């Protein structure tokens, strides 16, 4: 019994579920940053960051979301995933350094888990992109020589 089609379908469904959740969360947070929402500015001030940091973070988060949703562009997607990794680990460390409760430290780490699951389940891309599965050449003819 071959479970490959089911496994492939499950992997694809999980990829889109985690990517969709990542895009919704980071897109919403990025839009709030870009709009300089009062709660975002207050949160940044609490962490010791200046208000002008909000639209910078927001623009980059929205650019990363766009990269994840765009067809193709595997290298750009890798950069977006890396940027989200740095942003979310930085947020968790900033909350920890500010003495915030565990929930505020764990939220970015849980979101990071969702983002990294999306990264781990991403479809195979063109050859030459590190970390991507590619078809192996058939060497059976060479072995017969």
Image (cartoon, grey):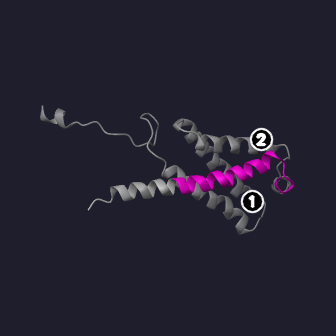
Residue 40 image offset from top left, x and y in percent: 82, 54
Where does the magenta region start and end? 16-40
61 vs 45, nearest the viewer = 61
Residue 139 image offset from top left, x and y in percent: 22, 36
Examine the rendered structure and indicate whether residue 66 appears above or below residue 20.
Answer: above
Q: Which residue is mark 1?
A: 95
Under circle 2, the secondary element is helix
**For this view, does 113 lie left or right of residue 57?**
left
The residue lying at 26 percent from left, 62 percent from top is: 1
Q: Main secondary structure of the magenta part?
A: helix
- Quarter of the image with the C terminus in it: top left
Mark 1 is surrounded, within 10 Å at the Cα level, by few (under 14), some (14 to 19) or many (20 or more) other residues, namely: many
31 vs 41, nearest the viewer = 31
Task: Evaluate whether residue 89 shows in this view.
Answer: no
Q: Which residue is mark 2?
A: 56
Residue 44 image offset from top left, x and y in percent: 82, 53
């Amino acid at each position: 019994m071959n479970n490959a089609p089911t496994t492939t379908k499950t992997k694809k469904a999980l990829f889109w579920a985690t990517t969709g959740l990542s895009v919704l969360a980071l897109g919403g947070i990025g839009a709030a940053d870009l709009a300089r929402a009062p709660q975002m500015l207050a949160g940044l001030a609490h962490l010791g960051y200046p208000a002008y940091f909000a639209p910078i973070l927001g623009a980059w988060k929205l650019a990363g979301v766009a990269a994840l949703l765009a067809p193709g562009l595997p290298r750009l997607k890798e950069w977006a995933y890396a940027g989200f990794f740095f942003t979310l680990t930085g947020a968790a460390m900033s909350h920890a350094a500010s003495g915030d409760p565990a929930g505020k430290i764990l939220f970015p780490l849980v979101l990071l888990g969702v983002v990294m699951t999306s990264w781990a389940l991403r479809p195979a891309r063109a050859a030459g992109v590190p970390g991507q599965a590619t078809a192996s050449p058939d060497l059976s003819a060479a072995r017969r020589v």
